[in-house]
Amino acid sequence: MTAPFTFAPAGVGLLARMRARAIRNHVREVVAEAPVKVFATVVFIGLIWFALFKLFEGVFLYFKTSMLQSVVAIPLVFHFFFVALLVLLTFSNAILMYGALYTHEESAYLLSSPLRAHSTVVVKYAESLILSSWSLLLLGIPLMLAIASVQDESWFFYPLFVVIFVGFVPIPGALGLFTAWGVARYLPRTMRRWLVYIAVGSILATIVWGLQSVRQLRFGGEEWLDDFFARMSLVELSILPSTWVTRGIEAAVNDARGDAVRYLIVTLANALFLSWLAVHVVAHRFVVGYDRAGTTRDDMGPLAVRASAGLANRVFFFLPHPARLIAAKDLRTFVRDPMQWSQLAILFGLMALYLLNMPRFDLDESSSHWVVIVPFLNLTAVSFILATFTSRFVFPMVSLERHQFWLLGLLPISRAWILVAKFAFAFLVTFGVAAAVTLLAGYILRMRGVALVMHLMVIASICVGLCGLAVGVGARLPVLTHRNPARIANGLGGTINLIASVLLIVVALAGMFLANLSEVAAQTRLFNLPVTLVARWFVVAFCITAGAVAMTVGTRHLNRMEL
């Protein structure tokens, strides 16, 4: 008779202690090697928390100015917020679990050990929940403090909010684990790639649907309410976990403790059950899924190569043919690595969610304070997301070419074109997503055409500066002893690049804030219009110059290297 299944089988404690010791050693190593980066990270998190707190507080105060908006809009914001998090966290957990269980080398070692598959799946699942829930922690604490500040909540609100917020995390985690196992078990590699593309397309379609729903509402009388509730009924279905969390938080805000506890119990019960079921199913079929994930063929390989080469020939037409091939190779690597583009998609997905849930404004003279605040906050968020991406993924690109340096040295082009090709690829990716979010913000906020064009120019210049810094500093201070991009980014060169990127963003944001402030204050003749133009063009020139200087320094060092 077999022993009954338990959620924590034998071996979980051993693996958990090993993982905890590895994390502790890694933290000590990072603190010893890059203390400045650790300090800067803590400071940045604090600044982000404070900025999000002020943003949420401002939004809730704005909603409180109207009783109708306060009653209707605030619950709707929470519904959209948790629906989007449900989708994004499911997608994120699916990618993390697929990589941890079916492609990581550690899985093969654990399968050959006497440990049960349940132990491996439980520990990997717990790691995935922790890694994917950092964004909830980053958003949840400022959100909780903003609600408490505006509503003057009692002490009961704080623990209830934290527990129901954290209890929500295992639900998309379990769905992501099921998705990862289903993809590995039943879909060949070609279908896996197409499934990822379909998932990204579905997220974009959901964002477009939400945008159209918000834009097509008519604010007037009973017709507006009928139209409003008809469009929003889909995200308020009682079967959705987002509805349980939203109603639980709403009950906690209104000090309805009985209802809040009931929704908390429903959320925790479903989270525990789905986690148990996902671990049980995946663990019993882990070996078969691992075998299928590593042995199925990819019949789309040659077609994908031809498609990416054709795209590179059109996008990077200004590069010499050998440099174009390098850019095409980087583009294929980016598309094939979900760890890169999925993080970028999740970050900008949250950014799009924030934009879709903003109040609808006409940015004209009647709302001069919003003319300064809203576009500036958008630019700040986009800039720091771009800095995160370039520091984490663009900076290690030159160091990761260490095994191909001898081959790159034989190419019939100067070494400067190698860095130009990597810069062109990085600029294409960063400016593509940043421009899309900027256009979305302009559409929602009804920005004037001239202001939108200037924002796009500033975003383009910031992308030039950040990509130039990442590629240039990466060539000047390469890390040739590591193959892991994360370890490369955590080194001395990565720390210098991060600090330089943050300084560039601070200068750019200061210039844009001065430009926006001078434009608003022009009515009182405190500033002149030339001040606005000079400040904006200074930002553009500064960012481009910083990127060009970094590229020049990196090129000189690369030319002197023995390949």
Image (tube, grey):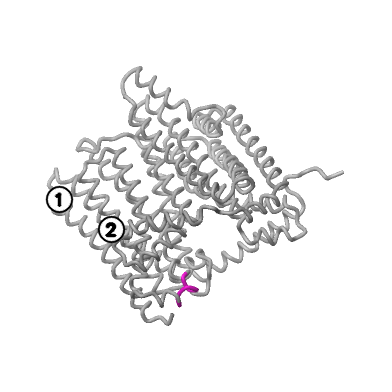
Taking the view exactly as shown, the residue that stands out farthest to the right is 1
The stretch drawn in magenta includes residue 189: no
> In the displayed structure, does residue 237 sit left or right of residue 344?
right
Query: Which of pointers 1 and 2 indicates the residue nearer the eye?
Result: 2
Q: Is residue 508 above or below residue 144?
A: below
Magenta stretch contains residue 405: yes
Image location (x, y in percent) of residue 238: 55, 27
Q: Hey, which residue is sitting farthest top in the picture?
A: 222
Circle 1: residue type: Phe
Tell me where residue 206 appears, x and y as whole percent: 44, 36
Residue visible at 46% across and 37% down? 81
Q: Quadrant of the N terminus?
A: top right
How many residues crowd around disc 2 within 10 Å: few (fewer than 14), some, or many (20 or more)? many
Residue 527: give its label.
Answer: 1
Q: Which of marks 1 and 2 is nearer the N terminus?
A: 2
Q: Can residue 500 be seen from the camera position used here?
A: no
Label 1–label 2 contact, CB within 8 A: no
Q: Is mark 2 on a helix, strand or loop?
A: helix
Which residue in the structure is indicated by mark 2?
461
Stretch of the chain drawn in magenta: 401-406
* Amino acid on which disc 2 is placed: Ser
Main secondary-structure element of the magenta-colored stretch: helix
In the picture, which quadrant includes the C terminus? bottom left
User: Residue at (39%, 66%) from the top-left corner?
Assistant: 497
Q: Residue 449 carries which label?
A: none
Q: Position of residue 213 (x, y in %)?
A: 38, 30
Q: How many discs appear?
A: 2
Q: In which quarter of the image is residue 210?
A: top left
11 is higher (above) or lower (below) than 239: below
The foreground one among 461 and 416 is 416
User: Which is nearer the eye, 511 or 546?
Assistant: 546
For residue 491, side relative to residue 122 (left or right)? left
